[in-house]
Structures are given as C-alpha cells and as structure tokens.
Image (spheres, rainbow, N blue to C red):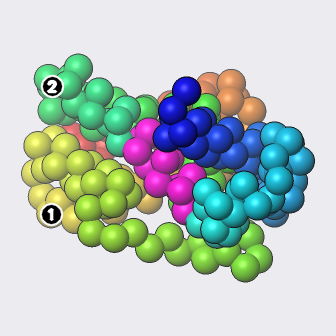
Amino acid sequence: MSSRRKNINIKNEILSAALEIAREKGWTEVSLRKIASRIDYSTIIIYSHFGSKHLLLLELIDMGFEKLLTRFRQVNSDETDDKLRIHRITNTTIEFFLSNRELYQLMFGIVGMPGFDSEYQCKPGCPKEQLSMFAKDVISKSAEGDVESLFFSWWAMVQGYISIGLSLPNDEFKSFLLPYLEEGIGRLFK
C-alpha cells in the first residue's frame, strides 16, 4: 500500500472514531486522546494529520457538507419536475439528518461545544456555500418570488422541524413531524 493511501486510511479511521465517540457520548466528549485510544494510535499521529481537535472538527464539517451536496446532486439528476425537486431535496436533508444526527448537529452548530466556534466560516466555494447555491437554484426553478426570501423560509422550516425532532427517535420523526413539514413546504411552493 502506498504511503499516500495509508495516510488516507489513517485519516478516515480518525474521522470515523471521532464520529463514533460523538454518537456514543456526545461532541463534548470527543478528544484527540480518546480518538487515539479508540483506534490504537498515538495522539502524535492524529496531530500529524489534523493539527488540533478544532481542525479535525472542521474536516468533519466539510466532509458532511460534501456528502449532503452529493445527495442533492443525485436528486437533481433523478428528478425532472422542478416542483417535486424541492420536496425531494427537503426529504434528502431530513434523511441525511436521521442517518447522520451527530454529524448534522456539528455541521449546523446545533451542539454547544465549549471552545469550539460553532459559526463555521467557509471560504468562497466551500461545500456549505455550494449547498446553499444549489438549493437557491432549485428554489428559483420551483417557485416565483424572491429567491433569497424563499430560500431562508424553506431553510428555517427544515431546520425548525429538525430542531423539534432532535429528541425523537427516527420512526417518530417520520410519522409525526415529517407530514407537517411536507405540508408546510407544499404551501410555501404552491
């Protein structure tokens, strides 16, 4: 195995271990020492890949936005009806949240972590910015009106329902909250 491939594998192991710890104990319990212990590497190895816990978390955030953006693009290529596309993107966002709760919370600053700037600052062209631009483009084709206003209304609705559903198991979220969200999105994009 090449050293580059080995480095990528180690990096992925580190990121996976951080997510596992967050899933089991919450983000405040994630530390480089605990990650090192979990994957049986020294903290020096982790520092050599990320430099700090902060940088590791930023890498996870970018990874999460890339995953969600990939799913949005798949919806875009699968769905030809502009009105249905916004509903599919909404459902894709919800499914991403339900299957990646800890990562989603980190991506959108939903979790409070002392010492971590929850205001993720991305550079122009970063995955988070691409995600917003993509959603705005879909919205511009799905409805008439001010795209910025519609985007923020849509996003507030999606994030609001996710916030309400943080404490619910996935099946309750789907059976109880999702129908109301879908109804709200339907009214927003008549």
The residue that appears at 33% across and 60% down in the rendered structure is 126
The residue that appears at 63% across and 68% down in the rendered structure is 51
The residue that appears at 54% across and 39% down in the rendered structure is 3
Q: Is residue 58 magenta?
A: yes
Q: Amino acid at mark 2?
A: Asp
Mark 2 surroundings: few (<14), some (14-19) or many (≥20) residues within 10 A:
few
What are the residue bounds of the magenta stretch?
57-68
Left or right relative to 45: residue 155 = left
Residue located beneath label 1 in the image: 146
Q: Amino acid at mark 1?
A: Asp
121 versus 60 height, above or below: below
Q: Position of residue 65 (x, y in %)?
A: 44, 49
Q: Disc 2 or 1, which lies upstream in sequence?
A: 2
The residue that appears at 81% across and 40% down in the rendered structure is 39
Q: Is residue 35 magenta?
A: no
Q: Position of residue 41 (x, y in %)?
A: 81, 46
Left or right relative to 85: residue 161 = right
Q: Are marks 2 and 1 in contact (CB under 8 Å)?
A: no
Residue located beneath label 2 in the image: 81
Q: Position of residue 53 (x, y in %)?
A: 69, 66
User: Is the C terminus in the top left, top right, bottom left or bottom right quadrant?
Assistant: top left
